[in-house]
Amino acid sequence: MVDLATILAGFADVFTLSTILYVLLDVVIGQFVGAIPGIGPVMAMAIAIPFSFVMSPLSAIGLLIGINKGGLVGGAIPAILMNTPGTPDAAATALDGYPLSKKGKPLKSMKMALYSSVTGDVFADILLITVAAPLAIIALQMGPVEVLSLMICAFAVIAGLIGNSVTKGIISALLGLLFATVGSDPQHFTPRFIFQWFELFEGLPLAPVAIGMLAISEILNKLAKHSGTAQAVISIPKEQAAEDKCISFKEYWSCRFTNIRGAFIGVLIGIVPGVGSTAAAFLSYSLTKRRSKEPESFGKGNLHGIAASESANSAVTGASMIPLFTLGIPGSVNAALIISALMIQGFEPGPLLFENQGQLVYGIFGTMLLANIINLCVGQFGLRLWSRIVMAPESFIYSSSLLLCVIGIGLTTGGLFGVVIMLIFAVLGYFMTALGYSSIIFIIAFFLGPRFEMSLGQTLVLLDGNPANFLEYPVGIFFLALTLVSAWWLVKKPTNKTPLNSTTK
Amino acid sequence: MYVDKLSGGFFALLGLILLFVLIPDQVELIESDGLTPQTFPVAISWLLVITGCTQLVITNKSKIEIRKEVIRVIALCSIFAGFIYIASWIQFIYLSPLLAFLLMKYMKENRLLWLGLGTLCTPFCIWFCVHVLLGRELI
């Protein structure tokens, strides 16, 4: 499908000065925002999207990837120094990272997190690069019936896994699909729910909806619950023995199986849409502890505990791009934001991306690998600096974030229309989250809505009004059977389970 | 009454309003053999009614508490909406220092350095990067 020349050209595109500088800047921004508790890479990505449309497609996607990868490393810093994870993904890192810091080894702890995070990330990216194209070829063979069945299956899994109630998950997905119907209908092009607001004829723009639901609603939540300035409880001693501030190769090598296991768990969980990196980190941590010869040392500053958590949560990022690139289904909120950026650039995510924009796709893969190397270098030198960032006041961070979101959306939509939409969806996002309805499911359903409706229409035509004709589509039957099995399993699960997704409050 | 029950009732009611008021009023009726513009919204609305009723019946957790935060969020959104309204006459970038100042004071920020950075430096940097460097018109 994609020839070798295109693949090489894609990877070569990465090695331009502008792309390298953009990725460097984005990794720095990612580590910076990851280090600030409460901001995190998701909000930073959401803020960056409107500014990405002035860049080339590769730089724009590289921007988001760099922030995401940097944010995962940065998120471990407050978890280790303050026992307050900068991102929910780093919660498991705090279990051993914080005790090790209290023993006077904060730099050692942060470096282990950095190395394991990069190891997990590289592993997942290589897997993505290897399997994405063959999977996309298979995905291209699927017709409307199979695509519809696959989307129903994805909705069932996402609605069941994110949050703590299947009913609420389904309602969130239905709301997303409902708002996706605003604008002209995809088959007859007649207006729906536009209420004489003619800007809505082309539908609700994705960027203001996503930024309102994810970033502004979170800013509103933080402003309403503000707690003052964060203070680091552990400072890095100026004079330390080398073994207390560095990870030797022997120590890193002793964690090799932990890192590989974490990366495997991260990849497996990342491929399933909606599960999220927090679940991967805790699963990897608990498996490592169970297999350890010294389980009693976990929670007291064991390097394996940090490695298990960080390798798993970072591997999820690369793996969650597999359903995005092969099927056009965003498996996580980060992937949904990358889809927004792709759409702003005029690309339709999905398997056709390999056929129509092969060079860009391999450029993105190259950017991901480059971001890992830069992440390692920036982290190596920047950890001391980021540990001071933890003290930046919330008042400055949130007011600046709000201004950036408003101006950015104003630029994307060319006026106040997008800002109004953003505010409306911020309020909706706040109340949905407060009442336990997932805004992430909403965004994924909102994005998939038009394709879902189109596939439904085409399926009805293909089946010719006779449900028995569905038997001619074995792949469709397989996905629907999978949906029923997943639904049965998810409904049967105890209802008081902990929400699995990292960004679901 | 419980939050989950109340929200379930709300979504069931929303489904009914969509079915009997909004869809007939806002979606054109077209005769077609396949999917009409009304089919998909109608299906979603019925599913909303069913899931909303399920939520209303099966849950019994989380008692309603009107928390201070909710009132604060409503107040913040009203201020924000006011700024957007005024921005239709005066460019938002000129209003942004005032909005940033109000937010920072609301968060009890009194340090002059941070107030200066938030209210003057951030809007200036945005203006410089977007208007001067990128050459784009600001809102």
Image (cartoon, coloured by chain):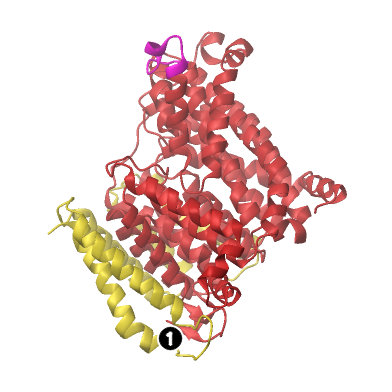
Counting labels gives: 1
Query: What residue is rendered at 42% in x and 44% in y?
Result: A501
Residue A358 place in picture, x, y as percent = 77, 55
Q: Which chain is yellow?
A: B
Q: Is residue B55 above or below residue A186?
A: above
Query: What residue is rendered at 53% in x and 35% in y?
Result: A266
Image quadrant in which the N terminus of chain A is located: bottom right
From the viewer's perspective, is B129 left or right of B97?
A: right
- Judge whether residue A298 is colored magenta: yes
From the viewer's perspective, is A302 left or right of A229?
A: right
Q: Colour of chain A?
A: red
Give the letter of the chain under mark 1.
B
Residue A291 in sight here? yes
Residue A307 place in picture, x, y as percent = 52, 23
Residue A413 place in picture, x, y as percent = 54, 71
From the viewer's perspective, is A369 left or right of B25?
A: right
Residue A104 place in picture, x, y as percent = 42, 14
- Judge whether residue B103 is colored magenta: no
The secondary structure that most of the magenta stretch takes on is loop
Per the image, the residue denoted by label 1 is B27
Q: Is residue B11 above or below residue A493?
A: below
